[in-house]
Image (cartoon, rainbow, N blue to C red):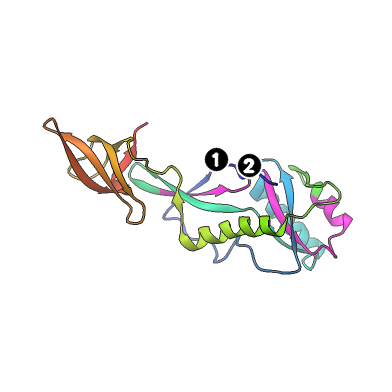
Amino acid sequence: MLDEKNTSPQEQEETQMPAEENAGLPQEDSKGLWYPLRVISGKERKIKERIELEVQRSGWSDAILQVLVPTEKVYKIRSGKKVIMERNLLPGYILVQADPDKFTGEMIQTIANIPNVIHFLGGNNPQAMRAAEANRLLGRVDESEESGESMLEPFIVGEMVKIIDGPFNDFVGELKEVNEERKKLKVVVKIFGRGTEVELNFMQVEKQE
């Protein structure tokens, strides 16, 4: 069973040009099994590119069907701006989809010898993920693409937030309600010594450090 842990997300500004449509998404292929490959954490993307180049160079595309770094989109509010990031669902792992009937020892050894690769789970006899486990993980990747990014550090009722935009700019108040669907918050700030509830959107506040 693989552990899904958080790692440092890779940041990209919201205004950045979108990636090629369906890039990095798992494609359906009933013949292929998913083999977890242990790698040095933080090197997943570069190793993925090296494997894909090797597959192309060696003509292994009929055996190695996909190489995937499972990620989900998240965002955080920084200085009033929405910053979109990608967070690895399985830090330190790459998933290699291969046809078990064509996945040879030469391919396995070549991939294992790529710099910063540790080994396949199972070593020289790679163990494929169980179907239910693979479907659950790949379903999260698909869901992230379809539903859009989720918040990396969600607002929590009862925490203190600072208002950074609008008539109550620089006020600090207590968060009373969070509406994730509408991206709205209700915050109580003190005006002339009395608590006053104001409604704000996510972009108008930031968490207190």
Locate residue 38, reporting x and y percent: 73, 45
Q: Are marks 1 and 2 in contact (CB under 8 Å)?
A: yes
Judge whether residue 153 is colored magenta.
no
Quarter of the image where one finds residue 142: bottom right
Residue beneath the point at 11% across and 32% down: 192
- The 10 Å Cα crowd at callout 2, few under 14, some 14 to 19, many 20 or more, is some
Locate residue 104, reporting x and y percent: 87, 59
Which residue extends farthest front? Answer: 132
Quarter of the image where one finds residue 139: bottom right
- Please tell me whether residue 79 is drawn above or below residue 95 in the rendered image: above
- The dot on residue 8 is 1
Q: Nearer the viewer, residue 180 or 207?
A: 180
Judge whether residue 104 is colored magenta.
yes
The amino acid on which the numbered mark 1 sits, given as a three-letter code, is Ser
- The 10 Å Cα crowd at callout 1, few under 14, some 14 to 19, many 20 or more, is few
Residue beneath the point at 45% across and 52% down: 150
Q: Which residue is mark 2?
A: 42
In-image side of 49 versus 119 (left or right): left
* Figure disc tally: 2
N-term-proximal mark, 1 vs 2: 1
Residue beneath the point at 28% across and 36% down: 162
Which residue extends farthest left? Answer: 192
Locate residue 201, reporting x and y percent: 28, 50
Per the rendered image, the range of residues in magenta is: 83-111
- Please tell me whether residue 154 is drawn above or below residue 60 in the rendered image: above
* Cα–Cα span, label 1 and label 2: 9 Å
- Please tell me whether residue 112 is drawn above or below residue 33 in the rendered image: above
Locate residue 14, reporting x and y percent: 42, 53
Residue beneath the point at 76% across and 68% down: 31
In-image side of 31 versus 74 (left or right): right
The amino acid on which the numbered mark 2 sits, given as a three-letter code, is Gly
